[in-house]
Every structure is written in structure tokens, then in C-alpha cells.
Image (cartoon, grey):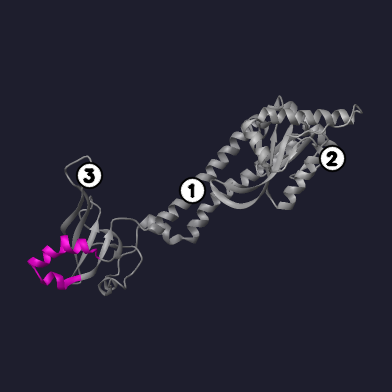
Amino acid sequence: MDGTFDRNIDRGNRNLALLGAGLLLLMPLIGLLFHQFVLYLVLGPEPADRAAILRSTPSSMPGQYMRIESVESVEIGEETQKTKYSTIPRVVARYHAVSIGGNLLVVRSKPGVKGPPFEGHLTRIPDDVRKAILQPEFNEDPELERQLVPVMFDAGDKDPKVIFFLMVATLSGGCGIATLVVLLLRRMGPSEHPSYRALSRYGAPEAVAAEIDGDVRMLDPELGSICYGSRWVIIPTLFGVQAYRYADLVWIHVKDHVVVIYLIPVFWSKGAVLHDRHGHSATVARGFTTNRAVELLVTLSARARWALVGYEPQYVYGWDNDRDGMIRYVDAQRDAIVSQRAGEGPVPEAKP
């Protein structure tokens, strides 16, 4: 694989390998930077500071997640919710009274949690909980209200920061593995590479690739740079290469483009959009500045003088609603230019 087309595919595969390895290496890096979250996942949250809990008020309380264990706990109520398909209310939370230093702390837990240890964070006591669950207890024993810690321990969920950390680490590792799997499949079946499959509209991909290499061989193009041959233009991409035959170009224009990797917008740029007579449209030269994108269009229009240039309303309408007619018009322009070059007459004036 020593042709320009194949060498650009190798360059794209190397970029794909670097991306996959980088995403996999990102997992331990994230774990190192946020080691406290790793410890949380492995060992759970740190034991609660009982003195800090007793000092807490609705306006001043620790924000971190903690664990309460080895305490006396009594279930004092439950929270239910009516369902659409059943007359029996569904239990969504249970409430416990926990003794801490001679005071009572209200704990909200998931329905399946019967007692300590509890893992969660401090929050204010909702008014509906105070009215529906605590007030009946206070009416029976007013002393309980004086012993109540003025905040509640919510053990109904996990620390959202840890969940976010886990999601980012999982996404990074999953995307890294997926990237390397794609690379492996491309290595095992080079002919199935998207850049090769795209050549099938011109003929047998291997034969077309050989024709492209022959067209640009004397130019000795720099790897990764756009190469203009006598019949073909080669446009490298981040993970492959695209090739277009001048004779097949119908319409070219510049368009704003968002570069997206794994559904994540990376940056905004200009891109050149090429439409050919096979009905194929693609944004090439992503990441270009306006000047570079315009430079590409000027160069292509000089080599494919018959192609329509610019994002004009009539071109958009023609491509979407009368593509065959648009292609016939461009074919006529190309034939006229070829005839003029052969000395058979001037190029006729025509409008698309």
C-alpha cells in the first residue's frame, strides 16, 4: 500500500488509533484526578460527623454525602403515590427516626431500606413531611419536637457528582473501545473502509484507487494535504480520504459546518460541499477558515469550469427538485467546454 490514496487511509487509521487510545487513557486519568469519587464507588461515602449534624440548620449544613451507621432507628412513616393502573398506592419512600447524641434525626430512604446504614446528604425537612408524618408524632409526645434535629437526612439517592463522574468515565471507555473495534474491522477488511466504498460510484474501488494514484503520482503530494491531479482531486479527512473526479462535479459551495465527534460538537468552521452527477453530496475540508474554503472552491471551479459555484437559491431548488435537469445542464456545459478546447466552436451561453 504505497499509493497516495492508500497512504492517506493509513494516516486516517493512525489518527483513529490515537483517538481510541486517548479515550481509554482518559479513564485512569479521570480516576486519578477525582480519586475521591473512586473511593466513594468502592468504599462508599465517609462516616458522618455526628457533631456537624447536630449543629446543622436549614441555612447551614454540610453539603457532602455521608454514611450513618450503628444507630438506633425506628420507622415512623412512609410516602405513597397513586398509580394510574392500580387502586393500591405505591410506596416511594420510608421515613425513620434515628437517635444521634440524644437527639432525633429524620431519615428518608428508599422503600426497600429497613434500617441503617444510611447513605445520603442533609437537606431541609419538607413542609408536607413535617405535617403528615412528624406532626402526629409530636401531638402524642411533645418532647420529640424539642429533640428533633432541624434538618433531614435524605438517603434516597446517590451523589450526583459521583454519578456524573461514572457516566463520563464509562462514556470515555466505551467510545475508546468502540473506536478501536472500528479500527480493527478496517484493518481486517481494507476494502470495506468507507473511503474505498465511496469509490464504488466510479467503478471497482481498487481499480479507481489505482487510477487516482496514477493521476497524482508525478505530483508527489505531501501526506495529509489536498492534491489536485489532472482528473482527480484528493481531499484528506481526519480518519480517511475523499476523492472526486472533476468531470463528475455538478455544484460546489461553501457552508458553515459543525465538527462533531461522538455526537459532541467540537468546533464550528467552514466546509466545502461538493455535489456530483451520481447524486453524492459531502462536506469536505471540514475545519477550514473562510479563506481556505473559498480557495478550494476557486481552484476546483478553475479545473471544473462547468460546475455551478455558490450557494444560490436556484441551485438549491434545482438539486432538491430537478436534480436530473441540473445534471443535464452541467453535462451540456462540460461538453461545450470540451468541444471548445478541441476547436469545435465557442461555449454557448446558457442559464440553469
> In terms of image quadrants, where is residue 146?
bottom left
CB within 8 Å, label 3 to label 2: no
Residue bearing the label numbered 1:
171
| Quarter of the picture holding the C terminus | top right
Give the SS element for disc 2. Answer: helix
Mark yes or no: residue 220 visible: yes
- Label 3 to label 2, Cα distance in Å? 73 Å
Q: Residue furthest right?
A: 343
Magenta range is: 125-148
| Quarter of the picture holding the N terminus | top right
Residue 261, position as x, y percentages in the image: 57, 47
Q: Amino acid at mark 1?
A: Leu
Q: Earlier in the sequence, mark 3 or mark 2?
A: 3
Q: Main secondary structure of the magenta part?
A: helix
- Label 1 to label 2, Cα distance in Å? 43 Å
- Other residues around mark 3 within 10 Å, as few (<14) / some (14–19) / many (≥20): few
Nearer the observer, disc 1 or disc 3?
Answer: 3
Residue bearing the label numbered 3:
83
- Label 1 to label 3, Cα distance in Å? 34 Å
In the image, residue 255 above or below residue 68: above
Give the SS element for disc 1. Answer: helix
Report the side of 38 relative to 192 (left or right).
Answer: left
Nearer the observer, disc 3 or disc 2?
Answer: 3
Mark yes or no: residue 9 visible: no
Q: Earlier in the sequence, mark 1 or mark 2?
A: 1
- Between residue 108 and residue 299, name the one nearer to us: 299
Residue bearing the label numbered 2:
219
Give the SS element for disc 3. Answer: loop
Nearer the observer, disc 1 or disc 2?
Answer: 2
Q: Amino acid at mark 3?
A: Thr
